[in-house]
């Protein structure tokens, strides 16, 4: 799949980040991970991001990363494209991106570099070096310490033909409008704020109709129903699902730092698709929070 073909795929539909399966000791479980992908693939996501943020990329060893991407690519071949997460230092991000390309992924999502702040010039150099290290498509994730402005993205699109996507996890409307107007159709634009469904209607109005869904991991039918309601501007259905599920869900998620991943793993466990515990420094939901989440899921009905 060349970068422009990947760009076309990412320009419509729902995207998601499969959880990474760990056993009770915190070690990667390839067998249940493959079963998870087999379960999710037919629901209709346009692409899946293996070893992404919800997949706890930040906690993985290099050998685990290779195994995760290989299992994802082999399991979903011919059904749904796999993009791999990459990130960390520039050299680490390059190594992971090249490994993902070797293993047959369709592209990579470049997650923010680790810890240190950087100038726009430094961010451009970082993204450019990653893009030029591979031939397949690269989507850059605008979040935390990696916040690219329109000038920087324009430089990058001029220099890097395989930079095909911009995923926004910041929520700065002025910046998003500036980028969307400046770059036009040169990039595909993805909504990437945590629990993106809450922002989906607003981002669609900005010209960003595509987003990634974490809850697809445990309520895939509802996630697809919500996406279709957003696409059809079915405000009644959108409002009902937000009121009945997403707002009380956010109330649980916002109680503890890191629960953005933990609550998704909890949801998967509650629907019989246990992905094991989160790895430190994340922490799992408390028993009473599990009960609250279980009640929310049961109100939605069969998935």
Image (cartoon, rainbow, N blue to C red):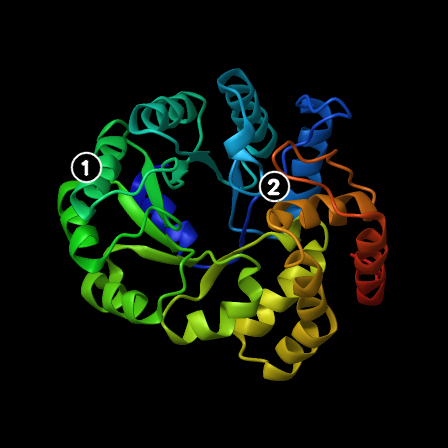
In the figure, is residue 153 to the left or right of 208? left
x, y percent for residue 32? 73, 29
Tell me which residue sits at (20%, 59%) in the image: 150
Q: For the C terminus, which image quadrant? A: bottom right
Alpha-carbon neighbours of circle 2 within 10 Å: few (<14), some, or many (≥20)?
Answer: many
Vertically, is 101 above or below 157?
Answer: above
User: Looking at the image, which is closer to me, 35 or 149?
Assistant: 149
Write the residue at 41% across / 64% down.
Answer: 171
Looking at this rendering, what residue extends furthest in the top direction? 63
Q: Residues within 10 Å of mark 1 (few under 14, many from 20)?
A: some
Q: Find numbered disc 1 in the image and state the secondary structure of the residue it sits on.
A: helix
* Front-most of residues 7 and 192: 192
**Residue tagged 1:** 125
User: In front: 100, or 61?
Assistant: 61
Q: Residue 92 in the image: state x and y as whole percent.
A: 36, 24
The x, y position of residue 271, in whole percent, is 81, 48
* Quadrant in the picture for residue 64: top right
Q: Is residue 101 above or below residue 301?
A: above
Q: Which of the 4 image quadrants contains residue 195?
A: bottom right
Residue wearing tag 2: 18
Q: How far apart are marks 2 and 1 (CA)?
A: 30 Å
Residue 169's spot in the image, x, y percent? 43, 56
Task: Identify the residue shown where x is 63% and y is 43%.
Answer: 41
């Amino acid at each position: 799949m060349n970068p422009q073909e990947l760009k076309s795929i990412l320009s419509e539909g729902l995207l998601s980040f499969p959880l990474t399966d760990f056993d009770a000791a915190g070690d990667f479980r390839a067998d249940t991970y493959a079963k998870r992908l087999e379960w999710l693939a037919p629901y209709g996501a346009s692409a899946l991001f293996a070893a992404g943020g919800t997949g706890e990329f930040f906690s993985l060893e290099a050998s685990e990363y290779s195994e995760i991407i290989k299992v994802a690519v082999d399991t979903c071949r011919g059904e749904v494209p796999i993009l791999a997460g990459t990130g960390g230092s520039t050299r680490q991000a390059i190594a992971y991106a090249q490994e993902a390309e070797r293993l047959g992924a369709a592209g990579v999502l470049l997650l923010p570099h680790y810890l240190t702040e950087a100038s726009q010039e430094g961010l451009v150099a970082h993204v450019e070096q990653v893009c030029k290290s591979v031939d397949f498509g690269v989507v850059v994730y605008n979040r935390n310490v990696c916040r690219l402005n329109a000038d920087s993205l324009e430089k990058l699109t001029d220099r890097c033909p395989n930079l095909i996507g911009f995923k926004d996890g910041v929520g700065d409307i002025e910046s998003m409008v500036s980028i969307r107007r400046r770059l036009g159709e040169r990039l595909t634009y993805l909504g990437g704020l945590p629990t993106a469904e809450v922002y989906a209607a607003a981002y669609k109005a900005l010209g960003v109709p595509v987003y990634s869904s974490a809850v697809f991991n445990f309520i895939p039918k509802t996630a697809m129903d919500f996406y279709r309601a957003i696409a059809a501007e079915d405000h009644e259905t959108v409002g009902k699902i937000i009121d009945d599920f997403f707002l009380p869900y956010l109330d649980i998620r916002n109680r503890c730092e890191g629960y953005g991943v933990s609550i998704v793993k909890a949801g998967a466990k509650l629907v019989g698709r246990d992905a094991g515990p989160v790895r430190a420094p994340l922490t799992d939901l408390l028993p009473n929070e599990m009960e609250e989440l279980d009640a929310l899921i049961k109100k939605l009905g069969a998935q």
